[in-house]
Amino acid sequence: MARPVIHHRTPEFSAVLDSARERLKPLFGTRQEVILLASSGTGAMEAAVANLLEPEDHAVFVNGGKFGERWGKLISAHGAIAHEIKVEWGRSVHPEQVDDALRAAPSAQAVFVQASETSTGALHPIAEIGEVARTRGVMLVVDGITSVGVFEQKMDEWGVDALVTGSQKALMLPPGLAMIALSQQALAHARESRAPRYYFDLLRELKAQRDEHTTAYTAAVALVFALNKALDLIYAETLPRVFARQLLMAEATRAAALVLGLRIFPDHPAPGVTAMVTPEGIDSSKLIRYMRDELGVSVQGGQDQMKGRLLRIGHMGYLAPFDMLIAVGALEVALSKAGHGFESGTGVAAVQARINQGI
Amino acid sequence: MARPVIHHRTPEFSAVLDSARERLKPLFGTRQEVILLASSGTGAMEAAVANLLEPEDHAVFVNGGKFGERWGKLISAHGAIAHEIKVEWGRSVHPEQVDDALRAAPSAQAVFVQASETSTGALHPIAEIGEVARTRGVMLVVDGITSVGVFEQKMDEWGVDALVTGSQKALMLPPGLAMIALSQQALAHARESRAPRYYFDLLRELKAQRDEHTTAYTAAVALVFALNKALDLIYAETLPRVFARQLLMAEATRAAALVLGLRIFPDHPAPGVTAMVTPEGIDSSKLIRYMRDELGVSVQGGQDQMKGRLLRIGHMGYLAPFDMLIAVGALEVALSKAGHGFESGTGVAAVQARINQGI
């Protein structure tokens, strides 16, 4: 990213763009084209809505956290009718709930869901939801912001019609670049849609990127170069080992939470982020501020109704297992300071024990 | 930009965001808030349309080049009715043409125009158009992508209701960050509008950036840090000297074009980019490819009907007067190679003569 920026309509940029787009396909589990957008992940979520739904269309969305809620807002913002599947925060949606919702909204065109709901750390069962969607003949749109590159995605096999991600999680980049892949069915829908869109017009971007080897509008050039470099790192490590490393960090963090007496919040935890409930009487916001300001270790808190109660440790992207020693070590110091009773060092030991088992 | 990326909901990021937003105001010539968006400039153009026009609204736009044409496409994409003022490429719109168009479309809500039409190098008279818009009681929306930071903008004084720019021109950054400021009148319009928008919802972004000191969605963090640094450079040089340096480069380039026998394309050339017509029988695309591939010097060509006929030299942002010696020197070599008759060295001498006069 520190290289001088070149123009986005040059052979040099085209080569980098082509290479990055091609090498993203295995991370998405697709043979379809991956389209880059100069926006954050929310922009690509909006692109999915704006290209696949028209005003007055009906759609079902899974709301099991902050990002599920965002699907609902996006669908409504575009004049479509959003049918909510309300899922208790921390729970995973059950495929039957999706089936019920589709039965109750027979004119729904699509289901919108997160593969991993970042705000609660819960995993949703995409493969099973894909079967339901296929049976009901509706499209499946998946927010993969904390799943693409974190664990294996099988977009084509699972019947996902749109899969979205962003640059700043498993792809190890600064934010500002988003990616989306569409199935043939989704492309056909987009071609027929008269819904208003311009910057997020995926057909225009697809044409530019696939046929003209550049972007329709000015590209986030530095981030595209950095993406290509990040993919070098990923393929040098190999994709299976990248997935295994991130899973190891997740398991190490969960093991530490258990021995420290912190409940893992989701019933089916995602491998990208571990959300734990802080003990009764301990405000997670204060814990996190102390860790950040006094210990120099950044973890995240809870949002909305879980503010002050959740502590989330991310283990996606540019992190190695021993980074979890740091995170858990700092968490122990902060918990101790906050008066939580536990045997000091046991969290760190749990992390180390999991590392010792190898990937 | 090479610094490790921090989270966008931290006091450290807030301080940088506040500083950058505050220091952009003089570049816009406004006391209003400047809102940052993680997108290219086209995204901010769409934000202006999506927040100020509703479907079925009428709007007038000036089409004197590729970017003027884009306003028309954006207005239509959002379901509003676009009334075109067709301006011959290379010409500046006359304020009376705007007045005529507004008289012919009395229900128009706004006029959309470029301050500087990058595709032709022409300057449009924003102050005068502002008077027309004020008299007719419509909003004025200006694409300032190659004017903000290039020459003085007086958004408030000129009565501009929305002024848009991007990171990759005068602001010296990689692309991927856009900025927009809205007048009080524009904000009132946005508040009443029910037009669909989410990622580009400027009211939500304004609230987040002004009141919460962060962005509504994930920020392009590295670019925001870089923007703040770019503003350090701009204020260290001082804004008047930045404008004077860019104008000097424009004048040096125009002087060189004249002695080399290349016609300056626009009748009122903008200070950010000089567009010149290549001599009869010389394809500008070949000239430009030769300059890039053989001489390592990047300049731009013409678009659409001016493809092969225009050569555009940019002199915005991170460039110093002697860079024009390089650009013109390379242009001389390429023209010579293409068989154009001129006295070698006269272009370079014209640049040097202008540099000698000082700013």
Image (cartoon, coloured by chain):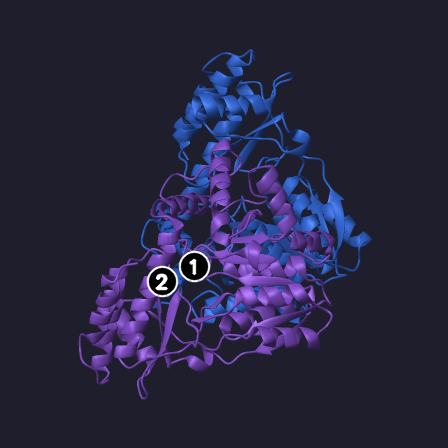
Chain colours: A blue, B purple
Does residue B214 appear anywhere in the picture?
yes
Where residue B43 sits: x, y (%)?
55, 58
> For this view, does A57 lie left or right of residue B74?
right
**Which residue appears farthest toward the left when viewing the image?**
B344
Work out whether A304 lies above or below B336.
above
Q: Which residue is mark 1?
A: B151
**Which residue appears farthest toward the bottom when viewing the image?**
B281
- Residue at 27 percent across and 68 percent down: it is B327
Where residue B136 sits: x, y (%)?
68, 67
* Image-quadrant location for residue B163: bottom right
* Image-quadrant location for residue B99: bottom right
- Residue at 21 percent across and 81 percent down: it is B337
Q: Chain of mark 1?
A: B
Q: Mark 2: which amino acid? A: Leu
Where residue B88 sits: x, y (%)?
51, 81
Q: Mark 1: which amino acid? A: Phe
> For this view, does A277 lie left or right of residue A151?
right
- Quadrant showing the N terminus of chain B: top left
Where residue A31 sits: x, y (%)?
50, 62
Asked whether the beta carbons under mark 1 and mark 2 sit within 8 Å of each other, the answer is yes
Query: How far, Cα to Cα, is label 1 from label 2?
Result: 8 Å
Q: Which residue is mark 2?
A: B247
Depth check, front residue: A284 or A180: A284
The local secondary structure at tag 2 comes to helix
